[in-house]
Image (cartoon, rainbow, N blue to C red):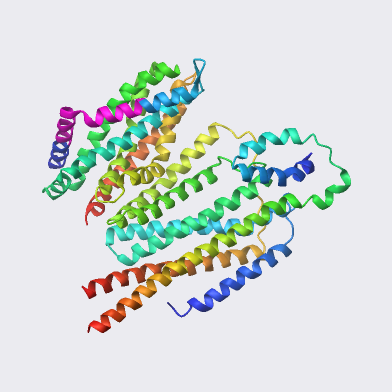
Amino acid sequence: MMTRLRRLAPVLALAALLSHAPAVSAQQAPQQMDEFVPIDKLPQQEQIPAANLLIPAYAFVWIAVLVYVGSIARRLGGVQRDVERLEADLKARK
Amino acid sequence: MPKWFTPASVICALMFAVSPLLIANAPFESTMGLVQKISYYHMPSAWIFLIAGIVCGVASIRYLFQGNLSQDRLAQAAAELVVLFGALAIVTGPLWARKAWGVWWQWDVRLTSSLMGWMVSVAYVLVRKYGGPGSDKLAAGLALFGMANVPFIYISVNYWRTIHPKTSVVPKLPLQMGIPFWFCVVAFVLLFTLLLRLRVRLEEQRARVDELYLALD
Amino acid sequence: MSRFFRVAWIVLRKDLTVEMRSLEIFSTSLFFAVSVVLFFAVAFVQEGRALDGAAAGILWIAVAFAGTLALGRTFERERQAETLRALLLAPADRPAIYVGKLLGIIALLLVTEVVLLPLIAYLFQAGFFSHLLWLAAILLAGTVGYCAVGTLFAAMLVRARSRDVLLPILLYPIAIPVIIAGVRATATLVAPEFDVALARFWLSLMAAYDVVFVTLALWSFEPLMTD
């Protein structure tokens, strides 16, 4: 029962991510659990659902941090240019 | 920038590069298996979220009552990091919960209070960005009220949820307190310090631009 | 101290006089609140039966929305006439001005609530009126808490750009606990059996919120309003 659920989790996760509606996946779960699952395929597929959650989690952290660092770098670069330009102007005026 | 900044950034980048290897080699947690490994990033994010919130609140209060401009810059920098680390915690959390609890989201007291605290920080950033003149005071007031609000949110959500018991049993989250975990905590604290310093630097440079414009007039 | 209350009273009387002459804020925000309630009635009342517990939520949503409108408009009026600056320049305690404004908004919202309650009770078949004293206490405590934060932010926003958008952004995250408490407390009144302990808990939470936030607002109004 539990393993079958796990096996279906990637499908559900994808469906939920696409629809942005956790409720939808929750409703689908009972229907799809009746499917037949060959027992010999279970061990190797056991880890796929967890990985499907794990990888997006780590990817999100990395991407979010990198995007933020990029945004600070961009803003800082712009301000830095302004500072240099203004300092040059000030010097030229004196 | 201070002298320690460049070496510290290199160390931080290395730590983050190494952390997936350490996490991958860490022992599996017995009941939740692989998905528990999200906690190596999730928990430090949540802690930094809280620390950044406290930094922002304290700095705002000091700015409000002492008029110290450097405190205002600190508060502004910390607020953006509250949004960043809050987003990390709030996104990685449900990915873990989907597996551990079977649902994406629980209206549990910690989750709900985090979400609402995060909303205050988003409001802070929006006010800073779109408030125009005087938004520094406005944002400081928001941070002050946001801090005072935390216990009320906690009590109200806690009582509300206790009165309406949860339908599914939420298992107590086991913690794998190993070397990789503390390694990640250190990496996140370092990342937070570096980003905070960098963000404060941005505000300092902006203030410098204003000064230069005034000098040119 | 008597001077403090005299200033507050003068500000309150001024606001009420202006409002009584035009009824502008009262009529517009009441109309807005009634439309909100009607929208919810369309959405949540099916075949004459309302969703369980919807009435309490809708009451507070309508109050919160109407309150936002009224708060924005009260200070917009001061801004257009440039009278807020005059008010702040007057040789009076600033916190007293805050208290006067706060009392005006509270009075306005309470009157709006008195009109809204029978309408919601009628549309949603909600028996609000079985415990009148409790109802009055809950409405008063919730409204005071909401307005305490709202008045402070609306006053600060007078000088800001895009103030109409920023008021809800600032106010709603902070007002969440008082709205949760208000909704839950009102829900106990509508529930088949009135749970006194529960109502008392929510009422005391709102009372604590009122005390903390009115104190904080009085304490921070001065530094927040100085340029």
Residue A30, percent across and down?
Answer: 73, 33
- The answer to whether residue B44 is left or right of residue C101 is right
Q: Is residue B73 visible?
A: yes
**Compared to B186, does A6 lie above or below?**
above
Q: Looking at the image, which is closer to me, B178 or C67?
A: C67
- The answer to whether residue B210 is left or right of residue C2 is right
Picture mark count: 0
Q: Residue furthest right?
A: A40
- The answer to whether residue C33 is left or right of residue B181 is left
Residue C111, percent across and down?
Answer: 27, 25
**Magenta highlight on residue B101:** no
Residue C102, percent across and down?
Answer: 25, 38
Q: Is residue C188 visible?
A: no
**Magenta highlight on residue C16:** yes
Q: Residue at x 38, y 61 (%)?
A: B75
Q: Looking at the image, which is closer to me, B20 or C210?
A: B20
Q: Residue furthest left?
A: C91
For residue C65, which quarter of the picture? Answer: top left
Residue C75, percent across and down?
Answer: 23, 41
Decide whether the magenta segment is chiefly helix, strand or loop. helix
- The answer to whether residue C75 is left or right of residue B92 is left
Q: Residue at x 70, y 52 (%)?
A: A52
Q: Residue at x 27, y 83 (%)?
A: A91
Q: Residue at x 39, y 41 (%)?
A: C172
**Compared to C164, does B48 lie above or below?**
below
Quadrant containing the N terminus of chain C is top left
Q: Looking at the image, which is closer to me, B168 or A22?
A: A22
Q: Magenta region: which residues?
A: C12-34
Q: Looking at the image, which is closer to me, B70 or C164?
A: C164
Quadrant containing the C terminus of chain C is bottom left
